[in-house]
Structure formats: structure tokens, C-alpha cells
Image (cartoon, helix red, strand yellow):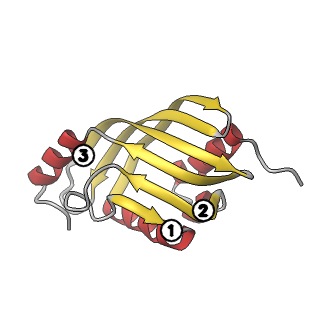
Amino acid sequence: MPHPGPLEAVTQFNRAWETGDIEAALAYVADDAVYELHVSKEVLPFGGLTAGRSAIAATLRRIRADWEYILYRPMALSQAGDIVRFQVEFMYRHRASGEVLTGRFRLVMRIEDGLIKRADEYHDRAKVEAFMRLVGGPR
């Protein structure tokens, strides 16, 4: 059975992630994948680099435990070879404080054999840091 192309793999991952189906999303993550959230671990405990599917699974579960997803809308997906770039419009409620963080961020994903091999997530770091100070930091 042929692997999904890069755009299809990312689209399917996003559909699962949007609905909170972490296991279905993980089906599109390679065993040796790397996820880098370009925000410091001092700001968010799951910031920085996470390597390996099982570590990424733990990170994704922690993200969903800490944040309620009110809106997760991928947009402007573009593919160049095995790279897919896109923006995400989001609205997340920080569960511990009840405060809401909104905005857009960018994701760059590299796909190999129908699986996400690397994902780089870029937020407005200053905005995220200010928000986390407002709510009292990581919890």
C-alpha cells in the first residue's frame, strides 16, 4: 500500500490533532521523529527539542492536558518536495488559570515515507512568555 504524500500526511495529522485524537495523530509520526517547539523550557515545560515518537507522544499528551483547544485551524498549507509549511490560527485555554491565548503560529514539517520526520513549531515567543508570566508560569 503506498504511503500518503507529504501534504496528505500533514492534513491527516492535523485532522486528528484538531479533534484531540492523539493516537490517530501519532500514526503519522515516525519512530525517530523530532519535534521542536521554538519556545524555551523555562516558559513551557514541553518547549525545546523532543526526540523519538514515544517522547513526542508524552509531549503531545502534556500539551492537551495543560491546554484546552478552542480553535486549531491549519491554513495556507504549501508543499515543496518533502517539506510542508503552514500557519495555524489558534485559541487555547490554559486549564490551570482559565486564561485564553490566541494568535497564529507557523509549522514546518518534513515528511519521509508518509510519516512526519521533523516538525518545527514557531510561535511569537515574546507573546507566549508574557502570557505565561500573566498566568504565573508553567504549572
List the residue tagged with mark 1. Answer: 57
Using a 10 Å C-alpha cutoff, classify the residue at mark 1 as few (fewer than 14 neighbours), some (14 to 19) or many (20 or more): some
* Amino acid type at image mark 2: Leu
Q: Is residue 88 above or below residue 18?
A: above
Cα distance in 3D space between marks 2 and 1 = 7 Å
Residue lying farthest right?
Answer: 1
Along the viewing direction, whichever of 24 and 87 lies nearer the viewer: 87
Which quadrant of the structure image shows residue 26?
bottom right
* Amino acid type at image mark 3: Val
Q: Earlier in the sequence, mark 1 or mark 3?
A: 1
Q: Earlier in the sequence, mark 3 or mark 2?
A: 2
Q: Are marks 3 and 2 in contact (CB under 8 Å)?
A: no
Numbered tag placed on residue 26 in the rendering: 2
Q: Regarding mark 3 in the picture, which secondary structure is present there? A: strand
* Amino acid type at image mark 1: Ala
Point 66% across, 61% down: residue: 27
Along the viewing direction, whichever of 47 and 21 lies nearer the viewer: 47
The location of residue 37, given as percent across then percent down, is 37, 52
Q: Earlier in the sequence, mark 2 or mark 1?
A: 2
In screen coordinates, is 87 left or right of 126? right
